[in-house]
Amino acid sequence: MITMYKAQTLNGDWVFGDYSMKVSKAGISHLITNENTQYEIDKDTLCRNTGYCDTEGNEIYEKDLVGHIRNHLVSRIGWDDASQQFKLFYQHSKCTGDLKGDLTIIGSASSQS
């Protein structure tokens, strides 16, 4: 089953599920809900599922850092408004690439650690 979002809770744990916002007199809360449990999250760590998996079958999310096995480049996954799709954004370069090839998740650019 594809999980649509991942994010870090306010105490730094990663959670996966559906994203929503709750507006109250106290302000806006950003939430991830899975299996009837809601977690308040840090909205800056919110990542959308790309619909792609790496070579080990792990779901790839927006802001993940991936290594390209063939050319040893590290890229960040991001949304490209011009093409309306997720792209690889290469470190130290303004170039982008398509999500294809032998990719392995090596971390997340949205991690608070």
Image: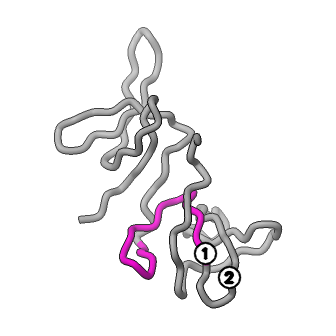
Q: Mark 1, residues whose alpha carbon is within 10 Å: few (<14), some, or many (≥20)?
A: many
Instruction: Residue 30 in the image: state x and y as whole percent.
Output: 43, 31
Residue bearing mark 1:
67
Q: Earlier in the sequence, mark 2 or mark 1?
A: 1
What's the distance in space between the residues labelled 2 and 1, CA to CA? 6 Å
Horizontal placement of 81 versus 51: left or right? right
Horizontal placement of 109 versus 51: left or right? right
**Residue type, numbered disc 1:** Gly
Mark 2 vs 1: CB contact within 8 A: yes
> Any mark on residue 72, and which?
2
Instruction: Residue 98 in the image: state x and y as whole percent.
Output: 60, 80
Residue 92: name its quadrant. bottom right
Q: Mark 2, residues whose alpha carbon is within 10 Å: few (<14), some, or many (≥20)?
A: few
Whether 100 is among the magenta residues is no
Instruction: Residue 74 in the image: state x and y as whole percent.
Output: 67, 72
**Residue type, numbered disc 2:** His
> Any mark on residue 3, and which?
none
Query: Where 5 sits versus 103, above or below?
Result: above
Nearest the camera: 65 or 30? 65
- SS for dot 1: strand
- Locate the N terminus by quadrant: bottom left
User: Over which residues does the magenta segment extend?
Assistant: 52-67
Horizontal placement of 59 versus 113: left or right? left
Instruction: Residue 28 in the image: state x and y as whole percent.
Output: 46, 22
- Disc count in the image? 2
- SS for dot 2: loop
Residue at screen point 51% across, 69% down: 105
Residue 24: name its quadrant. top left
